[in-house]
Every structure is written in C-alpha cells, then in structure tokens.
Image: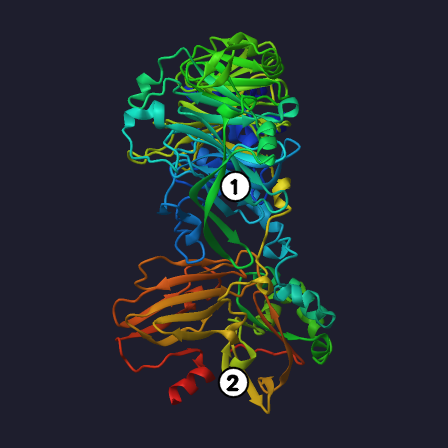
Amino acid sequence: MKTLCKILAITALPLLISCNQTRTETETVNGTESSTDAISAGGQENVKDDDSQKDVVKVAVGSPDHTTLVAALKQAELVTSLSNAGPFTVFAPTNEAFNKLPKGTVEGLMKDDKKEDLQNVLQYHVFMSALSPESLTDGQTLGMVNGDNVTVNVKDGVVKLNNSATVITSIRASNGIIYVIDGVLLPPPAK
Amino acid sequence: MKKILLTAISVTAFIMLSISGCKPKNAADSISGDAAERVYVAPGKYDELYNFVSGGFSGQVSVYGIPSSRLFRVIPVFSADPESGWGYNEETKPMLNTSHGEVPWDDQHHLDLSQTNGESDGRWLFANANNTPRVARIDLKTFRTSEIIEIPNSAGNHSSPFITENSEYVVAGTRFSVPMDDKNGDVPIDTYKKNFKGTISFISVAPTDGNMKIAFQLLLPGMNFDLSHSGKGPSSGWFFFSTYNSEQAHTLLEVNASKNDKDYILAVNWKKAEEYVKAGKGRKQTVKYAHNKYDDATHSATSEMENEVTVIDVKDFPDIVYMIPCPKSPHGCDVDPSGEYIVGSGKLAALIPVFSFSKIQKAIANKTFDGNYEGIPVLKYESALYGEVKKPGLGPLHTEFDGNGNAYTTFFISSEIVKWNVKDLKILDRHPTYYSPGHLMIPGGDTRKPYGKYLIAYNKITKDRFLPTGPELAQSAQLFDISGDKMKLLYDYPSIGEPHYAQAIPADKIVKNSVKIFKLEANKHPYVTMGEKKSKVVREGNKVHIYMTAMRSHFSPDNIEGIKLGDEVYFHVTNLEQDWDVPHGFAVKGALNAELLIMPGETSTLKWVPLKTGMYPIYCTDFCSALHQEMSGYVRVSPKGSNVPISFSLGKNSAAADSLLKK
C-alpha cells in the first residue's frame, strides 16, 4: 500500500510543476533530453558528404598505414574535434611508428583509465593552423594543442620533428594538412 | 492504509482539476491539443517540406521548413542583399540591370515551381518583379537566381509568374495598362481608352537548362490583369486570367474601377496562339529589355539588351481569347486539380463563382456570346458557370485545393479561411486567421496532384500576435493541419515582409540535387586564382587586379603595397576551400560599396577606390575556422605619383615581389 501511495505522489508531482508557472523549466528539461540524443549521435564526423574534399580524420581513416592512429583517436574521443573546421596540422605516425614504441605502450594507453594520457600524446601531434611544407623552417618551435612544444628540424630538405620523427610525406585535407611521420612524438614528462 | 490511499487519490484528482483550471483561455482554445507535437521537428531532424515564400516589398524569396516553420534562407532575387553581396559584387551587379538601369529594390509577389506532368518537379522556382516588370528563375540546385528577364510593354507585372503543366511557358500579365513601348507615352492620362493597352507575355522555358525567352505577347484592351493560373488535364492548353477595371478608370480606382457588376476572367487558348506564332503571324515590335543570366561556371552574370518581341493583337485572331463575366473585380483565379473548375474570387462579391471548362468549351463552340469587349467575344455568364458558393464570407481573395475535392478560400474582410466542396459547392468548415489573410498555400495546391496535409495563411495584419517591435511588425503566417474534416490551427510565426503567394514541395525532391560546393577545377572565372602560388597583383594603368585566394585561415597575398590614389582596385577573391559550408568573407576598410561572401570554389570581386593614403586592413568576415580572427592583412595606399612599387606577399615577400623591389 505504501508503495502505491508513493507512486501516486510521484505521478502527481510533475503535474503540479507543469501547472505551476514553471513552464520554462519543463521545456528546458525536454530540450536537454533531445540535445543529449543529438550529442550521443556524434558530431561533424557523421555529416553525409561525398562531394567535399576529405577532412584529416577521413584521410587517416582511408589510410591502411594509420589504423593504430585512427583507433587511438577514437579511444581518445578526438574524432569530433578533428572533423571540425580547424585548420589543423596533424603529424600522423604510421602503424610502424607505433610498433617502434616499447612493447605494451600502445595497449597501455588504449585502456579506459589512461584516456587522459592518450589524449595528451595525440594532442601533442596536432598544431592549430595548416602549415604548408614551405613554411616549415629549421629551428621553428610549434606550440601543440596539448600545450607542449615541438621543434622542427630541416636539413638537406629532410624535415624532422624533435630530431627524431621524420616527415615521410604530406597530404592536403579539407580542414588542414597531414604530415605522415615515422615516429611517435612523446610529450615531455609533466613537471 | 485504505484511508491513505483514498487521500492520495483525492489529492491527485484535485490536482487534475486544477490543471484544467490553469489552461490558458481565448486564442489558445482554438488550438488542438497535439499542435506542438505536430510542428515539432527534433534537433537534427529534417522538415517534411520546403516552403518558398514571396518577399513582397523586400524583393526577395524566403525558404522555410514545414511543419517546423523554421526559416532556412532568404534568397536574394530582385533586391541587393548585404548578406550575400548580391547586387554589390561585380559578378552579380548585372543581375539587377534593366532597361532603366540598375534597380536595387523591387517588389516580389508570386512564385511558381516548375512542373512536369502537372506536378512540381523541384528544378526551378519562378518569381515575378512587380514594379519594374521582370521574371526570375531560381535554380534549386544552388538556391540562387540564375536568370532575370525584363518584360517590355508592361507595367506592374502582377499576373505572373504562373506556369503551364510541363513548364512550357511562364506568363506575365500587366497590372497597369500603358501606352506600348514603341508608341509615344507622352500623352494625356485621360486618353487611357485610346492609348493604353494591356499585354500578357508568354515566356518559354527551355526544357533542359530552363533558359527563358519571351516567345510572344498578346495585345489586349486597356484594363488591369490581376492573377492567373494555367489549365490542367483537359484544360491544359488554356490559361485563365482575372481582370478588373473593365471601366478603364485611370484615377481613384477604388471607386471608379468598382462600378460594373461584373469584370472578366480571360480565357486564353495559348496552344492556338503558339500555332499562330509558329506560322509566322504576329507583329515584330522594336522594344528594349534586359536579359540577365548568371553562369555557375564563371560565377558571373551578364546583362544583354534584347530589342524585339512578337506581338499578337487578339483583335486580329478572334479564336485565342474569350472573356467570361465574373462578379465584382475578381482577384484570385484558381483552377482545381482536375482542370475542370475555375474559381474566380470577386473581392467585392458576396459569392464565389465556379466556372466549368467543359461548359466554356461548349459555349465557345455554340457561340453563346453576350456581345464583345473591345472586339473580344464575351461568353454568357450562365453558359460558363458551373455554380456559385453562396454567402461564403466577406472579401474572397484566393483559393487552393487539397486533392480530395475540397477548396479553401481566404476572406480578407471576414478574416477567415473557408473550406468548401468543389462539386456540391457546400461550405464544410471555416476558421478565423489572425488577421486578414491575403494568399494561402497548400503544398502542391495549384497543381494536378496536391500534397495536401497543411495549409498556410499569409496574413496582412499582425497587430498583437507577437511581442511588439515598434510600429513595424512582421507579417504573421499561420500553419493549419487540413488532414481531417476540420481545419486545425497549429502554429503562428513571423515572415519576411511581405509574403504574397507561396509554394511548397516535399523535401526529397530538392535535397538530392542540392549543391554542396563549387568544384574549383570547373571555375572559369576570368580572374580565378587556382592556388596560392598563383596569387598575384597586376597593374593595368590605374586599374589594379588582385588575384587573391582565401583558405583557412589566411588570404594570399595578405600584404599589398604600391596602390596609389586614383587607382581602381579589384579584389578578385577565390575561395580555395572544397569543403561544404566553409565560405570566406572579405572586407577592406573604407570600401564604399560592400563586402564579399565567397562560397567554396567560387571567385567574387570587390571594386575598391581608395580616397585617402594610409593603411587599410583587410579581413575575413565569415567565421571560417578557429583562426578566423587571424585571417587578415594590410593594404598600403600611397599618394598619386608615389614611387612605391607594386609588391605583395604572404608570410614573407615572394620572389616576384623581391624582383620588383630590386628594379
């Protein structure tokens, strides 16, 4: 019996509210519900568009050499951001580059409780503004999205980053430019 | 325990009662309970229909979604538009050219979608300019005005742009009769009866590209041609026009043009007229009218003056045109989906006459005439009449059809919509509108296959419907559900003034063709810059052409020197983006003209004549990217005769500029 009473009381409560000049609140609740649906459905990466040039994410997804990077971007929830207007410069390590890391590193970063670390590493590969190959100069410092710097080294036409990862090629995307690199850039340890 | 349960129940009951007590009164009583649900389109979901609404004195066309009534876009047509640069940038200025020069603001009243087999096909939308007579064709792949043709021998292009069942012709009937363009118009106004003539133009529409051409004009007695609609099915070779001022008044028309009991519906056998024109009949008349076309490949418009039109004087060809008496200054002239019934709405009449096409044909065959009007045979009213809707309301204006045998007519004076059955002419329902409706629109309601389901009333008077915004108010539109026996008011929303006629079409007929970007490799603009490395500044005398590119998030070049006072500077900005919904804008300080808004793959030109030496920032005006605020640059303006050479750069001085500096 008690339970039944409770149920009735609960049923009555929202009715009371709706009658009580708090219409705006009720509408806000409805609005939040619907926008939650929209958010869970994803962002600009889901836009159906076969006419535009591919963005940096779509280029990476289309590359058989970048399956680890793509999986990591998804795990780090960066796909929506990188499908945005940008413009981005993305240094994209190949699968081979990830394989060069000590055994277990990638697997470790892909764990749910290491999401922040993974985000830090991946954001260390993204620079805001689409840097053309001509604009990369020796000794140039790039302030990456994660807040740390990457140094550009140019010697005899070969571009390296932090004197370790070498740029293999560049690919123009709609919202920026991708530089394929043969090493993973590791952000400096937190101070 | 039982006691508690009872208390709970009684409390609930009390609450229920008090809920019904707090329901708002008055206007809301006429709104059905599920109205909110019926117009609600959830975030991220699409509307069922596109709704194109004429912009009246704004000169533009607005695009809404139905049922949400959300405004998606205003398409610039007959007025310059500071949002898109229409009429401001060098490419689109020719679109507003007329034989009178550039007209930056016109009055846009009626719309008609292109049709195939009597159904809206979603290819083009036609729009009329009322004041300086023109017809525009809007391409629904790009939602841009593709073509505008001026109408000679016309003034007040009101009876336009209604279309035939297979888009063979768009018509343009003159509201104001005037002396013809090749005659001396400098005559006393009171020689109206002698010197003033009316015309109806038939503009052919090329089946593949939609290009318009004035195929022929019918020369008619001086009077006012008001509205029109094409025949359908059995009547498809015919067109029907309402007329008023058979009194041929030229002053105080509100009294002097309302004297006769009946004016006329004009029935035009356009197939017959077409035959005569094909046989070489008709007079070639020298006239002057502008024909403007926008080319998607060059992203530029051209304006050409045409100088001839073929005129058929209906007096000489008595089997083209017949007049049907219609009570009291008819306004709307609407043909039902079967093509058999023609509804004339005498705006001062106490009834709605419905004419029968088969009876009209019989009357013509049997010559059941009641004399003639300036040489045009007048049919006996009864011989053409199917029946009358008695006492329908006050001030009938326009009628649309739902495809289930029902007609819906707006009544301006009694401020309502009346639903009636076309066959038995009985009134089935009436619903007030807020306030004083002009046109109404049912999706496909003027075609052979109405979509039905919704009805929108476009009201002339708003008063207290929305939060007040000073003396000037947006015209209110009202969305009705007409799927049941009774009309249900769903929603009330502001429009872009002033809506007259409108059209609507299921969204899928348009969505699939909608262009996302312009392909850069297909850009044939004479000043296109196909990549940043090709950007440059070229001086030709006092003209300076800047071949500029825009790409997230910079212009190339973004530093320009060597501009001098007295120069005419042309910024030809190519948006190199190939990404949907990434336009760039362009503005330069002190530009007396405007800004640019450039779609992906497009080139637009801003003419700039600097009047003072100094430093002029340029920047992107459309928020394009995270570094939009960085998308800027400088242009240096030196005095006349200065020896500062032309130079330009991005990031650093380019080789070309260095070499120029060394010279």
Quadrant of the rendering where the N terminus of chain B is positioned: top right
* Residue B112 locus on image (x, y percent): 53, 34
Residue B221 falls in image quadrant: top left
Looking at the image, which residue sits at the far bottom?
A: A156
Of residue B578 and residue A164, the one placed in the foreground of this image is: B578
Q: Look at label 2 and name its amino acid.
A: Thr
Q: Which mark is residue A61?
A: none
Residue highlighted by disc 2:
A137
Of residue B76 and residue B265, the one placed in the foreground of this image is: B265
Image mark count? 2
In the depicted structure, whether residue B148 falls above or below residue B233: below
Disc 1, SS: helix
In the depicted structure, whether residue B231 falls above or below residue B73: above
Say which residue appears at 43% left-offset and 62% top-offset.
B605
Say which residue appears at 37% left-offset and 62% top-offset.
B607
Position of B599 with respect to A178 (left or right) is left
In the depicted structure, whether residue A10 falls above or below residue A36: above
Instruction: Characterize the local packing of mark 2: few (<14), some (14-19) or many (20 or more) Cα atoms within 10 angstroms.
Output: some
Q: Look at label 1 and name its amino acid.
A: Gly
Label 2 with label 1: CB-CB less than 8 Å: no
* Residue B153 locus on image (x, y percent): 42, 35
In the depicted structure, whether residue B236 falls above or below residue A117: above
Closest to the camera, between mark 2 and mark 1, is 2
Q: Earlier in the sequence, mark 2 or mark 1?
A: 1
Position of B411 with respect to A117 (left or right) is left
Image color mode: rainbow
Residue highlighted by disc 1:
A31
Of all chains, the one bearing label 1 is A
Instruction: Characterize the local packing of mark 1: few (<14), some (14-19) or many (20 or more) Cα atoms within 10 angstroms.
Output: some
The reply to whether residue B532 is visible in this rendering is yes
Of residue B370 and residue B145, the one placed in the foreground of this image is: B370
